[in-house]
């Protein structure tokens, strides 16, 4: 083969490799859900109200995985946003409200039935104060809202799978859909990025239930972007 | 510069080249290098051992850490002269035989450049002694130090001699370590707290994929495999903070799978353990009975209760493991 031919092959392979690398970086690694900002709408130091909902399947209006379980967050304007990256002020009380529309099951590790790291070490489940929930009873636990590096864990008790109005896809709303309201408060630490996740292996169809939505930012895990 | 025929050959020259000057003026290069190397090694090895050695990771918080620090120092004491030999030869060659230096003969090959029995034997014997010596040293250290903090599997053959050993179970799951204390009612905690001056047996297992429990300052490192009890021993010698990390790539939040533990006094540990046992009693009764391993339900999304054989909640199987049961929406 001539020198020109060999050079063309080398250059061609280089271009293909470089193109793949660029696609991997810009088309995959740098693509993520939007950051929902809760810092600008609140006076400095005032508690932040953070409302989220969990849905058994996100539906067709929110991306490439309509059957995946997911969180939605209500932005300061009251719109439901499909994002798990939330910008929050540092050293501030966060009043979390979870509208739980998904059904539950026993936990793989009942340790995550314990309310931990919240103000007072408690949460409320449909108005009733709880410090622990036995996932082996009732409707089990659908998901947990956990920030492992901060020691925060809140079990989200599932709705009855036998209810005839279980929400089929997002966005869900009561009373047309069965829901549980779980509330808890926690304090944000200093500035930093803190990953949060669900400890219920709810990735239906994936090994040990921890793939798919459990391993994709924007569904069952995300970041608290805590800023000063 | 004048060279004799022997040094010319060693320097890459040919012995048949005419030499300039009297042979007895040529320095004995090899002995020069040996002398420089020996002096540097005799000076730097003790300097490293006594000045740097006490600060070498992982510190001195546990018996395993102390022994592993000693092992690292021994490795460095052996490696340093080897490194110095290479550096001395390199530096000496650059200085003495650089091409711009006047009188240095052109490097050439030839029969005498191809082989040198003394060098070959010396190289092989030295390398063999070092490698076999390190093998024996490492094995002895593993045996005499109860595994040196490494996971020994479910049936350890190197066990500590302590009369009382505190068992702490490490449960890995995507993506967090939790800890159970079987001698305190089997409570489970997100915190790792252990007493000082105590031999600890870490029983490491996993509820899902393979993780790795790496308690850096404790010098404990043991794989966390599902359905396997991997045991590692150490004896605490200092109080302080411990960093625990997962050291096996285990998924999306592997990088966030860390926490901090504490080695505290025996009395402080007892107070913590009893208070935590009391505070978590309501949840502890909902935990599965303590076992060295657990069998998580592998049927995908249902979460599953472990051990599976005591799962009394039939809805755990609704996602497909049990035929004929309806799949709930959501």
Image (spheres, rainbow, N blue to C red):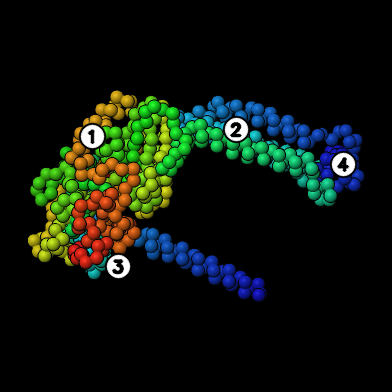
Image coords of residue A168 (percent x, y) = 18, 66
* Quadrant for the C terminus of chain B in the image: bottom left
Q: Is residue B41 above or below residue B19?
A: above
Disc 3 chain ID: A
- Packing grade of label 4 (10 A; few <14, some 14-19, many >=20) is some
Instruction: Residue at 22% x, 31% y: name it.
Output: B275
Nearer-the-camera pick, B2 or A201 = A201
The numbered disc on residue B277 is: 1
Q: Name the residue under label 2.
A: B77
- The residues tagged by marks 2 and 3 sit, at their Cα atoms, a distance apart of 58 Å
- The residues tagged by marks 1 and 3 sit, at their Cα atoms, a distance apart of 46 Å
State which mark lies toward you, 4 or 1: 1
Image coords of residue B137 (percent x, y) = 58, 34
Q: Mark 3 points at which residue?
A: A64
Same subunit, labels 4 and 3: the answer reads no
Q: Is residue A184 visible?
A: no
Q: Which of marks 4 and 1 is nearer the N terminus?
A: 4
Instruction: Residue at 84% x, 49% y: name it.
Output: B111
- The residues tagged by marks 4 and 1 sit, at their Cα atoms, a distance apart of 83 Å
* Quadrant for the N terminus of chain B in the image: top right
Image coords of residue B250 (percent x, y) = 38, 52
**Do residues under tags 1 and 3 come within 8 Å of each other at their CB atoms?**
no
Same subunit, labels 4 and 1: the answer reads yes
Secondary-structure class at tag 2: helix
- The residues tagged by marks 1 and 2 sit, at their Cα atoms, a distance apart of 47 Å
Q: Which of marks 2 and 4 is nearer the N terminus?
A: 4
Instruction: Residue at 58% x, 71% y: name it.
Output: A9
């Amino acid at each position: 083969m001539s020198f020109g031919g060999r050079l063309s092959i080398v250059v061609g392979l280089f271009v293909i490799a470089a193109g793949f690398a660029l696609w991997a970086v810009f088309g995959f690694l740098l693509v993520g859900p939007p950051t929902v900002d809760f810092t600008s709408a609140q006076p400095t130091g005032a508690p932040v109200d953070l409302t989220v909902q969990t849905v058994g399947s996100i539906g067709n209006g929110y991306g490439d995985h309509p059957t995946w379980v997911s969180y939605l967050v209500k932005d300061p304007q009251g719109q439901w946003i499909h994002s798990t990256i939330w910008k929050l002020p540092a050293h501030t009380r966060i009043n979390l409200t979870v509208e739980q529309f998904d059904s539950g099951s026993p936990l793989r590790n009942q340790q995550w039935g314990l309310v931990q790291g919240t103000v007072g070490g408690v949460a409320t489940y449909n108005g009733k104060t709880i410090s622990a929930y036995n996932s082996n009873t009732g409707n089990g636990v659908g998901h947990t809202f956990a920030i492992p590096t901060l020691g925060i864990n809140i079990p989200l008790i599932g709705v009855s799978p036998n209810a005839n109005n279980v929400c089929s896809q997002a966005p869900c709303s009561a009373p047309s859909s069965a829901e549980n309201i779980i509330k808890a408060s926690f304090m944000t630490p200093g500035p930093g990025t803190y990953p949060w996740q669900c400890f219920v292996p709810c990735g239906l169809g994936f090994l040990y239930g921890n793939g798919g939505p459990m391993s994709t930012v924007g569904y069952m895990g995300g970041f608290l972007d805590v800023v000063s | 510069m004048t060279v004799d025929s022997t040094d010319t050959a060693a320097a890459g020259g040919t012995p048949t080249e005419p030499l300039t000057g009297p042979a007895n003026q040529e320095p004995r290069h090899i002995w020069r290098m040996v002398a420089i190397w020996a002096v540097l090694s005799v000076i730097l090895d003790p300097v490293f051992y006594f000045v740097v050695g006490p600060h070498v990771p992982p510190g001195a918080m546990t018996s395993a850490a102390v022994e592993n620090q000693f092992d690292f120092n021994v490795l460095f004491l052996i490696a340093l002269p080897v490194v110095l030999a290479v550096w001395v030869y390199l530096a000496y060659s650059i200085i003495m035989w650089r091409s711009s230096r006047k009188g240095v003969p052109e490097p050439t090959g030839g029969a005498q450049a191809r082989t040198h029995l003394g060098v070959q034997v010396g190289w092989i014997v030295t390398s063999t002694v070092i490698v076999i010596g390190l093998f024996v040293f490492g094995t002895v250290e593993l045996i005499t130090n109860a595994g040196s903090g490494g996971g020994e599997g479910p049936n350890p053959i190197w066990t500590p001699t302590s009369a009382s050993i505190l068992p702490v179970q490490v449960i890995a799951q995507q993506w967090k370590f939790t800890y159970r204390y079987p001698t305190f009612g089997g409570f489970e905690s997100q915190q790792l707290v252990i007493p000082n001056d105590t031999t600890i047996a870490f029983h490491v297992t996993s509820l899902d994929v393979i993780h790795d429990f790496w308690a850096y300052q404790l010098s404990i490192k043991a794989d966390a495999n599902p359905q396997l009890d991997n045991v590692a021993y150490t004896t605490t010698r200092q109080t302080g903070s411990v960093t625990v990390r997962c050291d096996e790539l285990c998924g999306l939040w592997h990088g966030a799978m860390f926490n901090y533990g504490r080695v505290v006094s025996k009395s402080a540990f007892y107070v913590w353990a009893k208070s935590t046992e009391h505070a978590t009693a309501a949840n502890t009764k909902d935990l599965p009975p303590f076992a060295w391993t657990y069998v998580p339900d592998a049927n995908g999304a249902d979460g599953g209760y472990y051990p599976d054989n005591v799962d009394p909640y039939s809805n755990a199987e609704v996602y497909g493991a049990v035929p004929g049961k309806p799949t709930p929406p959501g």
